[in-house]
Image (cartoon, helix red, strand yellow):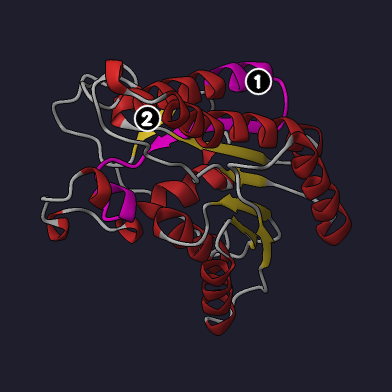
C-alpha cells in the first residue's frame, strides 16, 4: 500500500522517538521533522543522537531535542522525570514511536541464558511499558495523540531459535492491543508496525550472510511511520501493520 502524507502533516506536533540514533529510528525522526514535527531524540549513544540532531538542523527543519537514556538501566522515575522535562520545555506531547530494541542471542530456547532473556525483556518490553505508562496522562491531552510500537514477523508467529526476541515481540503486540482497547474512547490511537527485513544493524547481526543490498532501506518503509503518526490515520487503532506486506499473506495478525 502507498501512503501519501501531506508535506505538513505533522505540523505543530511534538514526537518522541526512541532508538533515534540510527536505523529506522533515525530515518523516522528525520522524516517526522521533514513533515513539520518537533522531534525529541531518545537513545543511549549521545554522539549518534547529536549526528541526527545536526542533520535535522542542517536540513532546515525545526530544532529537535535530545534525551540521552539507556533503556537497560532506566527506572520508572527516569521516565516520569523525562515527561516532566518535555512538559516544561514543549508543553505538549503528541506522539511516541517505540523503536528501540535489542536482538539478544539467537539460540535454542533451552540454551537461552537467563541474563540474555532478562536483557531483551528489559529493553523490548519493560522499558516500553514504563515509558508508555509515564506518557499516557500527558499524551491524552493531545487533540490527536499517537503511540506506535515496533513488532516483528516473529512477533506474530514464533520461529525456532528466535526465543527471547520473538517472545518480547508477542508481548509488545499484546501491550499495544490492551492499550488501544483502553484508549479507544480517547483521542489517542495506538498501533504497531512490523518493519520486515530492513537494512539495519540489527538485521545484519541476525543474518550476517545476507546480501543487504536486496533489502529495503529504512527510508523505503518510512511513509507508513509518518502515516500512522499523522491525521490521516485518525481512524486506525489496535492494528499491527506490515510495512512490507507479502502478496500471499493471509493478514491474520498484521495487515
Note whether residue 235 is visible. no
Residue 179 place in picture, x, y as percent:
62, 21
Q: Secondary structure at mark 1?
A: loop
- Rendering quarter of residue 153: top left
Q: Is residue 198 magenta?
A: yes
- Rendering quarter of residue 33: bottom right
Picture disc at residue 67: none
What residue is rendered at 32% in x and 55% in y?
201
Closer to the N terminus: mark 2 or mark 1?
2
Q: Could you say which is closer to the camera, residue 138 or residue 77? A: 77
Residue identified by numbered label 2: 165
Quarter of the image containing the N terminus? top left
Note whether residue 100 is visible. yes
Q: Is residue 67 above or below residue 61?
A: above
CA gap, disc 2 and disc 1:
28 Å
Q: Could you say which is closer to the camera, residue 168 or residue 12? A: 168
Residue identified by numbered label 1: 184
Q: Is residue 87 magenta?
A: no
What residue is rendered at 63% in x and 29% in y?
129
In this picture, which residue range is highlighted in magenta? 177-203
Residue 120 place in picture, x, y as percent:
46, 33
Q: Could you say which is closer to the camera, residue 130 or residue 229? A: 130
Tell me, yes or no, whether the two marked residues, 2 and 1, touch with CB atoms within 8 Å.
no
Amino acid at each position: 500500500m502507498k501512503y501519501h502524507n501531506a508535506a505538513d502533516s505533522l505540523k505543530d506536533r511534538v514526537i518522541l522517538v526512541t532508538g533515534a540514533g540510527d536505523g529506522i529510528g533515525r530515518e523516522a525522526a528525520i522524516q517526522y521533522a521533514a513533515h513539520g514535527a518537533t522531534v525529541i531524540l531518545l537513545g543511549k549513544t549521545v554522539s549518534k543522537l547529536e549526528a541526527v540532531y545536526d542533520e535535522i538542523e542542517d536540513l532546515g527543519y525545526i530544532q529537535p531535542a535530545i534525551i540521552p537514556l539507556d533503556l537497560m538501566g532506566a527506572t520508572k522515575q527516569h521516565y516520569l522525570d523525562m515527561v516532566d522535562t518535555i512538559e516544561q520545555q514543549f508543553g505538549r506531547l503528541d506522539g511516541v514511536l517505540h523503536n528501540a530494541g535489542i536482538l539478544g542471542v539467537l539460540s535454542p530456547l533451552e540454551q537461552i541464558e537467563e541474563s540474555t532473556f532478562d536483557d531483551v525483556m528489559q529493553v523490548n518490553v519493560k522499558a516500553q511499558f514504563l515509558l508508555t505508562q509515564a506518557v499516557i496522562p500527558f499524551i491524552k491531552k493531545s487533540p490527536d495523540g499517537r503511540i506506535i510500537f515496533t513488532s516483528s514477523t516473529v512477533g506474530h508467529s514464533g520461529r525456532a531459535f528466535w526465543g527471547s526476541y520473538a517472545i518480547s515481540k508477542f508481548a509488545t503486540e499484546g501491550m499495544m492491543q490492551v492499550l488501544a482497547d483502553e484508549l479507544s474512547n480517547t483521542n489517542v490511537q495506538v498501533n504497531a508496525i512490523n518493519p520486515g527485513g530492513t537494512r539495519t544493524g540489527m538485521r545484519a547481526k541476525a543474518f550476517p550472510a545476507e546480501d543487504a543490498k536486496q533489502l529495503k532501506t529504512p527510508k523505503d518503509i518510512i511513509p507508513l511511520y509518518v502515516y500512522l503518526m499523522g491525521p490521516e490515520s485518525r481512524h486506525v487503532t489496535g492494528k499491527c501493520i506490515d510495512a512490507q506486506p507479502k502478496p500471499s499473506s493471509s493478514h491474520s495478525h498484521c495487515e
